[in-house]
Amino acid sequence: MLPTPKKFFVTAGSSEGKNPLNAFDNALLKGKIGNLNLMRVTSILPPGVEYCPDMEIPPGSLVPTAYGYIISDVPGELIAAAVGVGFSNDTFGVIMEYSGKCSEGEAAKAIERMLIEAFETRGMELKGTKIAAAEHRVENIGCALAAVPLWY
């Protein structure tokens, strides 16, 4: 069984690549998580987890991460991705991810709405948020990505 993460941060990045996978990899590098092995997880932030914006994770680590991304090969298209973490006073938090053909600001607003709904659905009070977003105007093949890495 995996241990419960104790730390997290939010990040976002966007980039071009010569193919979709390299565009994705380059966006990961811009978000400072390109040298990690991401294990995609869903949307719950463990109770008591600490926000560590400058956290460094050893390269090659297996890292539980909630993330959203979009890749496009339509020159001139604007794409964006965002993640958000919603906090409660005394229990777990909720993570939401979004990506689409929109601006960074529109993606961040979508995340705000999603967090409000997630807390309302759970009957919990939303005490605060952390949001990261990135947009990208596609030249050839572009990617926008946003993520919440969780660490021990």
Image: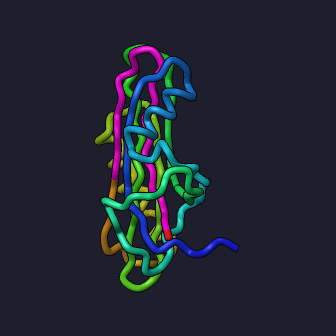
Quadrant assignment, res 1: bottom right
Q: Position of residue 32 (x, y in %)?
A: 39, 46
Residue drawn at x 46%, y 30% as measured from the top left? 143
Depth check, front residue: 109 or 76: 76
Q: Position of residue 93 (x, y in %)?
A: 45, 72
Residue drawn at x 39%, y 52% as measured from the top left? 111
Residue drawn at x 40%, y 29% as measured from the top left? 15
Depth check, front residue: 84 or 54: 54
Residue drawn at x 50%, y 75% as measured from the top left? 46
Q: Residue furthest bottom?
A: 90
Any magenta on residue 100? no
Q: Main secondary structure of the magenta part?
A: strand
Q: Position of residue 23 (x, y in %)?
A: 49, 27
In the shown orientation, is residue 102 left or right of residue 150? left
In the shown orientation, is residue 2 left or right of residue 87? right
The residue segment tinted magenta is 132-151
Q: Position of residue 123 (x, y in %)?
A: 47, 78
Residue 2, placed above or below residue 22: below
Residue 136, placed above or below residue 75: below
Residue 112, placed above or below residue 102: below
